[in-house]
Every structure is written in C-alpha cells, then in structure tokens.
Amino acid sequence: MAWLTADDAAFAEHARWLASAKGRATCDRLLRNGLAGQFAAGLLSAASGEMARQVESWKLVGYLFAQEPWQGPLRAAGIESAPPSPRSFAGVPLTPIVHALLGLYGKDALAWCIYAYLTRTGSAATEIGDAIVAHALAFDATLEAIEAALTELEAEPDTQPSGIPTKIAKLLA
C-alpha cells in the first residue's frame, strides 16, 4: 500500500487499476484496513490535476461512489474538487459522476450536472436528468443552476445543443 503516499503518477496508475475487476479485492482491503479515507482524499486531490488525470479520477469517483461503503470515505475526505467540462468526457457515461457530484457537493455541483444534461442526448440525457431529479434539490437552486449552465453554454463558440427548452421543461416538471 506504499503507493497511497507515492507520487501522483504511481497513485494514478494504482487508482486506474482499482476500477478494474482485478482491483476489487484491493478496494475491499482499503475499506477493511481503514485506508479508504486516505485513498479518497488522494483521489479527490488528483481529480483537480491535469485534464486526462481529472477525467480518469472522476470516472473512478463515480464508480466508487455508486458503492455505498465508499460514500462515507469520499464525503469525509472533505476535499472540494470539480471535474472538467462535461464535454471532456467523450464516450464516458456521466450518470455515475453526476450521482457522485450531487452526493458529495449537493447544490454546489448542480450547474455542472445540468450542463452535462443539456449537452447529452438520448438515454444519456434521460439518465442524467433522472439522477438530478432523484437528488431532489430545492427548486430555487435548480433554477440558479439552469441559469449558470445556460450562461456557460452561451459563452461557447461552437454550436448549441438542440432541444434545450424541452430538456429544461422536463427537468422542472
């Protein structure tokens, strides 16, 4: 377990491995040995690094947060972190990340989650919308987050996603 205190590259390599089927036993060992908090803090810290590392870290945060025993250590880490733009996650399911963000940061993560919802299509958008609704955040917070997400979308030079008014209506309904 020396990799827990190793440099960022070694930590990131082991973190990626933990998301694989072969790494499940080590995840369980981290929980049993009381090292889950240290790992969670390292993972959330790595989630603020360079872009590729952020994407990998947030994929793992989403994966681990979906497992109830990991929710406590991730919350207790107390590290504020935010993933890069949802557009950075090409081909990556965002629903687990949305659940993790809302579970960790609540309304402070809502604008990112709504932005992800507005920029995805089909079942990916539906799943993200369902995750947002499942967290039942205050209506005022949802409206503020919608406004922030729309402001960010308007600031982008590329084309705007279609169906935004319909998606917002579904989210608010």
Image (spheres, grey):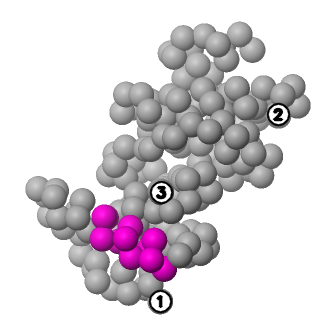
Q: Which residues are magenta?
A: 139-149
Front residue (pair 153, 122): 153
The amino acid type found where label 2 is placed reads: Leu
| Rendered-image quadrant of the N terminus | top right
Q: Is residue 42 above or below residue 148?
A: above
Q: Nearer the viewer, mark 3 or mark 1?
A: 3
For this orientation, the residue located farthest to the right is 32
Spot occupied by residue 99 in the image (x, y as percentages of width and height): 58, 59
In the picture of the structure, the residue carrying the numbered disc 2 is 31
Front residue (pair 161, 85): 85
In the picture of the structure, the residue carrying the numbered disc 1 is 173
**SS under mark 2:** helix
Q: CA distance from mark 3 to mark 1?
A: 21 Å
Among the two numbered marks 3 and 1 on one chain, the one whose residue lies closer to the N terminus = 3
Q: Residue at x 56, y 59 (%)?
A: 106
Spot occupied by residue 90 in the image (x, y as percentages of width and height): 36, 49
- Horizontal placement of 171 versus 104: left or right? left
**SS under mark 3:** helix
Mark 3 crowd level (few <14, some 14–19, many ≥20, 10 Å Cα) = some
